[in-house]
Image: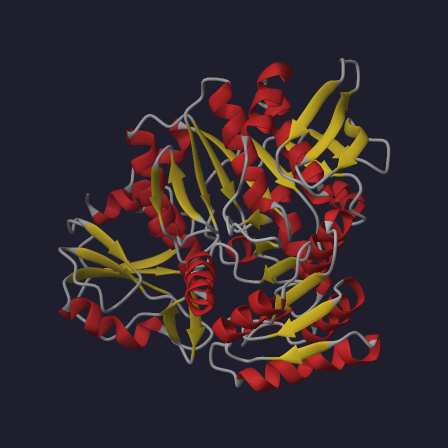
Amino acid sequence: MKLWELLTELPYVEETRGNMNTEIRELTSSSRDKTDAGLFFCIVGARFDAHDYAWEAVENGCVALIVEHFVEMDVPQVLVNNGRAAMARIAEAFYGHPSRQMRMIGITGTKGKTTTTYLLQSICEKAGLKCGIIGSTGTVVEEQHLDSKLTTPDPIELQKMLRMMADEGVKVVCMEVSAHAIDMNRLDGMTFEVGCYTNLSQDHLDYFYTMERYFETKKQFFTSGMVKNAAMNADDETSAKLKDGICCPFITYGICVDADVFARDIEITEEGAKFNVQLHGMNQIAIRMRMTGMFNVYNALAATSCALIMGIAPEKIKAGLEAVTRVPGRIEVLQTDTPYKVILDYSHSPDALENILKTVRQFARNRVIALFGCGGDRDKGKRPMMGEIGGRLADYCILTSDNPRTENPMVILAAIEKGIKPTGKPYEVIENRREAIRHALRMAEEGDVIVLAGKGHETYQEIMGIKRPFDEKVIVSDLLLEMQKEQD
């Protein structure tokens, strides 16, 4: 593809230098990638300015540059005022605008994005629509699963995935839309048939600094013109502010307030959630989900609302919701064959930890043992908050490492302790997460529920910039086997 062809829909070009007829065969934002006639995007990041590495990209095969300021190199260069937005638009054009060939559904919010995409995928498939997922658990199309580093991938990876989906006959894409992706223009140029807003609670303040900026970034998804129809959680107090600037048609869902789609007669048990979905002007839909928790009722309402906007029949919605038995790392009960339960959950924010512990408290026959930590190099304000929540809602807490990244794990744990100490609940600190899990399994008694919070679907632990294998499903299985051998 010629360089000039990639620029035809780009509103950010300020000036060009060199031969715009240059052939482009690959796109990259990493100067270390080996390319064949590559186009390199000189992105200015928080720690590095890729303009400083343009020479390396050219040495590795790049033949042209997208820049925010010209560099002293004899290669074609395109000057833009927003490198990230330009990357999104060019990637979309390079891969042939794949999102235009499918129905795009975007789910944003602090919690519930992943589960909502899985529920909506199930609904779509019951309606005969081949559906793909893009989100924090990776890219999923039927039995295929590809890992991804980000909840919403960078534009080059994202458009490559969408191209693959379109070529395989996918009709609907359900994708998680992170606030980071919105702020970094990763979705520029795309249009979503439906955008869903689940909720807002404290997270990512290391990046956004204030809850107001975090919210305004989420809101931008709906006010930018890229969303044609919206569904929003009426029970979340921020939804009222979201309505103020929204221009597209929308419907609301909820439990506590009058909404267009609402749940009644809710029963939460160990086996799942039973409730009736009421649609204004339509009959009730009786739902028996095989996943438990009030938050999963909300996730079901979110998926239902999106499906209704898409025109999917109520009976297909019911069949889809009831077919889902598990979502990776989301209140996932592990098969342990023990007199106590072990639950894996991705809850790594205060609100998420509170939700999972409250849910488990409803069906635990004995103690709730919470094992959790907080990520390093991230929002430090939530650490004592999570300590307080663990102490208030669990019977016993084990504080341990999550992904400490470049921080000292004991500094993170000390901050969590500040929140748990005033609760007076018993707890202990075991920094090594494997040993912490071993201790939880050893101390568990009949009827106890162990909640392994924070890692969920992740299969690694990041320590000092290195991602080491750490799959809690495997670790729990291995530890139980070791304990069994010790008894024999």
In the shown orientation, is residue 213 left or right of residue 77?
right
| Residue 8 appears in the rendering | no
In the shown orientation, is residue 316 left or right of residue 419?
left
Q: Position of residue 20 (x, y in %)?
A: 21, 52
Q: Quadrant of the N terminus?
A: top left
Total marks in image? 0
The residue positioned 79% from the left and 74% from the top of the image is: 425
View extreme (right): residue: 257
Looking at the image, is 306 positioned above or below residue 18?
A: above
Of 168 and 442, nearer the camera is 442
The residue positioned 47% from the left and 76% from the top of the image is: 405
| Residue 48 appears in the rendering | yes
Looking at the image, is 170 positioned above or below residue 379?
A: above
Looking at the image, is 237 positioned above or below residue 390?
A: above
Looking at the image, is 196 positioned above or below residue 450?
A: above
The residue positioned 31% from the left and 37% from the top of the image is: 163
Of 437 and 297, nearer the camera is 437
Q: Position of residue 22 (x, y in %)?
A: 16, 51
Of 114 and 76, nearer the camera is 114
Q: In which image quadrant can residue 71 be found?
A: bottom left
Of 229 and 232, nearer the camera is 232
In the shown orientation, is residue 221 left or right of residue 48?
right
Q: Quadrant of the C terminus?
A: bottom left
* Colouring used for the render: secondary structure
Q: Position of residue 402 (x, y in %)?
A: 53, 71
Q: In which image quadrant can residue 198 be found?
A: top right
